[in-house]
Amino acid sequence: MLCRCATPGCYVAHVTERRPSICVFLPIFAPAGGMHGDNTYSVWPLPFPFPFPRHSLTLPSNTTNMKYKLLGRSGLKVSELCLGSMGFGTEAGWGADKDASFDIMDAFANAGGNFIDTANIYKLGASEKIIGEYVSHHDRDYFVLATKYSLKDNITNPNASGNNRKNMMRSVEESLKRLKTDFIDVLYLHIWDDLTPIDEVLRAMDDLIRQGKVTYAAISDTPAWVVAKGNTLAELMGWSQFVALQVEYSLLARTPERELIPMAKHFGMTVTPWAPLGGGALTGKYLRGEQGRIKEESVRRGDRAVNITKVVIDIADELGVSPGNVALKWTMQQGFSSIPVVGATKLNQLEDNLKTVGVELTPAQLKKLDEASAIQLGFPGDFFREDAVKTNTFGGFYDKVEKRV
């Protein structure tokens, strides 16, 4: 397709079948339409070949502050922040409309972000549709699109939800249509149903990967022992292993440190925390009297949460940054591969989140945050920390032996 930009004589051709977008200069005047620099275009069909000089579509400069991490044990390079799109669409009475969602994705991409997270159920499918429309007019290969299956997107039959193979195949086909693409970069199992054998899940995901409809497998909101069994089976059988684990993790929700995060470290999986700002509580908005979606009786607004948020605010004041920057950066400096999923329904929210990549917490600040938000690991985590156990297990050499990271 040929698209009109604001530059006289310049038209932008978008080829979505895994080939880069190109600009074609024609000896005609392009009427005022989209803004080339803003990646917004008016679409015109092109009924003839491209014998003209061309240059690449404007992409984020490599001088941006955004860095890229490898997703788990794979070679896939993703931005150190992941854009969450659960709020793309206005279904259920809240969220960003299409234009606002496009502005958010523009800002994210222009800052060097390439990792976008969605799900079949988000906004009744509207999230995937908005992303699909946006990406179909940009370079598809620049973006790493992650979506999820498992949760109902219709109630027609008992197999239209759950982790089973039948639902996975159906859900993926529907997501591909909404996303207007022929492949999904990362497919997550969304929530464990405690019914489907994990080998059924992994074999089905591996089949989709071999078909080229999915590139990488991942999992979310599932017990550590299930994920560990799955990746062990996958390694034994030669199937694709889970490369990422998505769980709730923040200064307000540290229980994944008991089993899930140690498991992820062992298998070389990247953790992609959802609700890294505690649903907005860690920004301090509720302490300022602002309104939001979290109910007053929620634990995210309880006494413990208030005390933790006050420490976050104090450190933010020290650094001259926002509390949200501090809370996000804490999840990124925990000694394991972690890429927080940052949701936004307003452009200014994303703009503030993007500043996180330029923040660095000192060891003293990390210690203060850890102490304020500490949890009991329970057995066996706290047991392993007892001095007597360390002495007997290491024969008095605990402090002299290198630890695995």
Image (cartoon, rainbow, N blue to C red):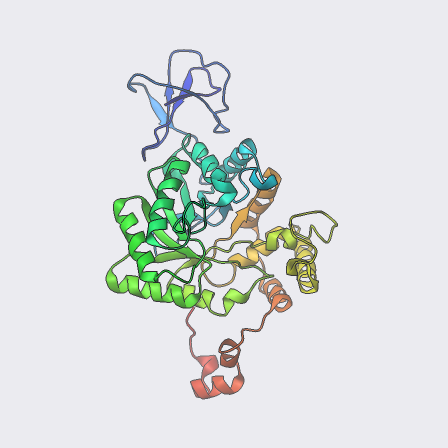
Find residue 196 and report its image quarter.
Answer: bottom left
- Give the x, y percent position of residue 321: 64, 50
Q: Residue furthest top?
A: 28
Q: Where is residue 380 shown, x and y percent of the image?
A: 49, 78
What is the x, y in percent for residue 29? 44, 11
Image quadrant in which the N terminus is located: top left
- Report the front residue among 99 and 268: 99
Residue at figure coordinates x 31%, y 66% from the top left: 232
Q: Residue, x 54% and y 76% (percent of image)?
A: 378
- x and y, in percent, of residue 30 in the image: 45, 14
In the depicted structure, whether residue 287 falls above or below residue 111: below
- The image quadrant where one finds the C terminus is bottom left
Res 266 visible? no
Q: Give left or right: position of 114 versus 370.
A: left
Q: Quadrant of residue 306?
A: bottom right
- Judged left or right of residue 276, residue 23 is left
Side of 11 relative to 288 (left or right): left
Q: Is 382 located above or below residue 99 in the figure?
A: below
Instruction: From this view, report whether residue 374 is shown above or below residue 129.
Output: below
Q: What residue do we see at 75% from left, 50% from top?
A: 289
- For the image, the number of numbered tags is 0
Can you see residue 275? Answer: yes
Q: Residue furthest front?
A: 157
